[in-house]
Image (spheres, grey):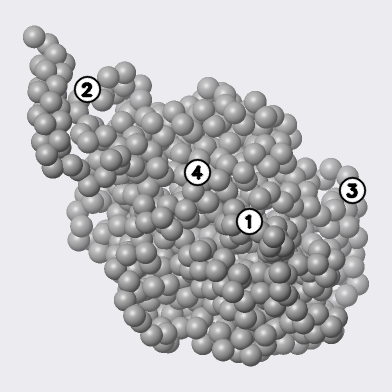
Amino acid sequence: MSDTDSIKKGFEAYDSGVEKSIARFPERKKSFVTGSKSPVKRLYTPLDDAGRDYARDVGFPGEYPYTRGVQNTMYRGRFWTMRQYAGFSTAEESNKRYKFLLEQGTTGLSVAFDLPTQIGYDSDHALSQGEVGKVGVAIDSLADMEILFDGIPLDKVSTSMTINAPASVLLAMYIAVAEKQGVSPDKLEGTIQNDILKEYVARGTYIFPPAPSMRLITDIFAYCSKSVPNWNTISISGYHIREAGSTAAQEVAFTIADGIAYVDAAIKAGLDVDQFAPRLSFFFNAHNDLFEEVAKFRAARRVWAKVMKERFGAKSPKSLSLRFHTQTAGSTLTAQQPDNNIVRVAIQTLAAVLGGTQSLHTNSKDEALALPTEASVRIALRTQQIVAYESGAAETIDPLAGSYYVESMTDRIQKEAEAYIATIDGLGGAVKAIEKGYVQQEIQDAAYAYQMDVESGERVVVGVNKFQIEEGSPKGLLRVDPIVGERQAAKLKELRAKRDNRAVEGTLAALKAGAKGDANLMPLILDAVKAYATLGEICDVLRAEFGEYQQKVIL
Amino acid sequence: MERTIRVLVAKPGLDGHDRGAKVIARALRDAGMEVIYTGLRQTPEQIVSAAVQEDVDVVAMSILSGAHNHLFPRVMELLKEKGVDDVLVIGGGVIPDDDIPGLKGAGIAAVFTPGSPTGDIIEFIKKNLKRKA
């Protein structure tokens, strides 16, 4: 009898025994599902491995198809980068928070900008009222950026900036600050998010329509490949798609479909795939279902490697390997019994680490209520440090590989994601699928189903629909001083009076001419930034040339 | 027969988080209400003019960016300026408890924070409509 036959026989015997016992003692539920509502079997065995070829589908770390990880030593070489997303109020306040985080042992910075900055409005714009300094730091010009990184040597830290529509402007400011510190652009390490497609479907900080937005993005790819070679030019993000309510497989699918659209656009712009693709990076969510999340990260690596090799003919291993940042799932945090969030974040951290992330942000327990305080940020960072130094999860590579359950779920997520990507191809690619509202509708349907499951009690959220207690108002939340808006407006007034306004006008006119033609806009934006043109002024020039995106409202 | 309740679900300000607003819009629709959703980035002026134009009974606003203390009261002011006093206005989002009394003082009838069941919101609307069906 072969191995498989004996396992089959054993399984049948086990199964009939189970059928008898559950006839008397039923299981907790009729059917069991993952966090994303995929069916979960009672037991996974070697029988579930049928059809998987180890060398072809799993392989070795640092080798195609990268299922087991993108580096050959993973965390035995060095831990993931512990990078806490932070920023609020003014550049001065945020600079203090960054120095605090570096003292506490974070190994990279991650800048949160306020909404006016993300949407290209100066702090004194009418639409900025009430929003200045709220969800991130207010940056109006190079002058603010100089304060933001004061005393932080930019050749020693890597910096991630969550900035999309005006990514070129903020990257230009970063390059300019570095030059003032005597650091040349080729020494800079970091990431700009620069992923406009997910803004249209899930995050909302778009400015321009798709075509000129794609041009700005590919201009950055081209510019950085020559001048800022160690910069991650984009962070293709599934995080926000998941936060908007998608399933795990949709998160992989829609992110990689967006990635395909960027690669297509860059190739159409005349770039060589192996020149820019090594600097593409990704950003995923770490949600509650530990095993499904680990499988998701493994599947994402495999799907991307296949896409890059088979669809785009990429040859460089760096083009094929999906490097990603992870953030724990903000949408799983509860306002009720907020201390419980520490435990959720710990499980999600473990998922990210077992899934082989390159960097990680852990959310703080109070983020369903307000921006986090220093004390709660410290716990969030300590959570990463405990997983790194105490849990043992980082001592061997991809420790859940070979788990019948995790391998089978990795295959399932790959299959589901590839089916979605085929559907999106059929619609004409990610840009078209978004314009038609297909992606938005899929996400919203999943989000609504999730909420209904919570309300019916089918999905338990501890402290929300089960195990509730009477509790008072949480104390000691962080508050942003509402005076920040006025302070920024005063700074702007002073800047506009002091700077060389003829130089500003000259650089803005050059940018306008460039935008009309097909010049790479990065050098022109850099000139404007160095002349202290404001973010709003630069974006206004581009708005006038490119127009503004009109959201497709889907219910 | 009862008249159908008309609701404007609105996203004031620059905040892009619309998962909650859309889930609520859909839940209200499933509960038999007529729902108009504004989409993102609405100014208080746009929200008030949509409320008047659509002749709604309820305005339900969602903000997760922290700008609620500025934008919610501004909508109330503009409604008052237009002489609209029979529209029920409610709000939701990431809103600290300490801010709720101030918002209620400005005329926001209720504030629903994260974890609020959609059933509670539906019930609140039905019980507190200012215009009688």
Secondary structure beneath label 2: helix
Q: Residue A441: x, y in percent? A: 62, 44
Q: Residue A414: x, y in percent? A: 43, 31
Q: From the image, tell me which residue sits under label 3.
A: A516
For the question of whether residue A33 can be seen, the reply is yes
Q: Determine the CA span between mark 3 and mark 2.
A: 61 Å
Mark 4 is surrounded, within 10 Å at the Cα level, by few (under 14), some (14 to 19) or many (20 or more) other residues, namely many
Q: From the image, tell me which residue sits under label 1.
A: B32
Which numbered mark, 2 or 1, is in the foreground of this view? 1
Which numbered mark, 3 or 2, is in the foreground of this view? 2
Counting the numbered discs, the total is 4
Callouts 3 and 2 in the same chain = yes
Q: Which mark is residue A64?
A: none
Q: Determine the CA span between mark 4 and mark 2.
A: 28 Å
**Residue pictured at 67% horizontal, 88% vertical:** B106
Which numbered mark, 4 or 1, is in the foreground of this view? 1
Chain for disc number 3: A
**Residue A428 or A300: which is nearer the viewer?**
A428
Q: Determine the CA span between mark 4 and mark 1.
A: 32 Å
Which numbered mark, 3 or 4, is in the foreground of this view? 4
Q: Is residue A74 above or below residue A390?
A: above
Q: Quadrant of residue B90?
A: bottom right
Q: Which mark is residue A47?
A: 2
Q: Are marks 3 and 4 in contact (CB under 8 Å)?
A: no
**Residue A341 or B4: which is nearer the viewer?**
B4
Amino acid, disc 3: Lys
Q: Is residue A376 above or below residue A305?
A: below
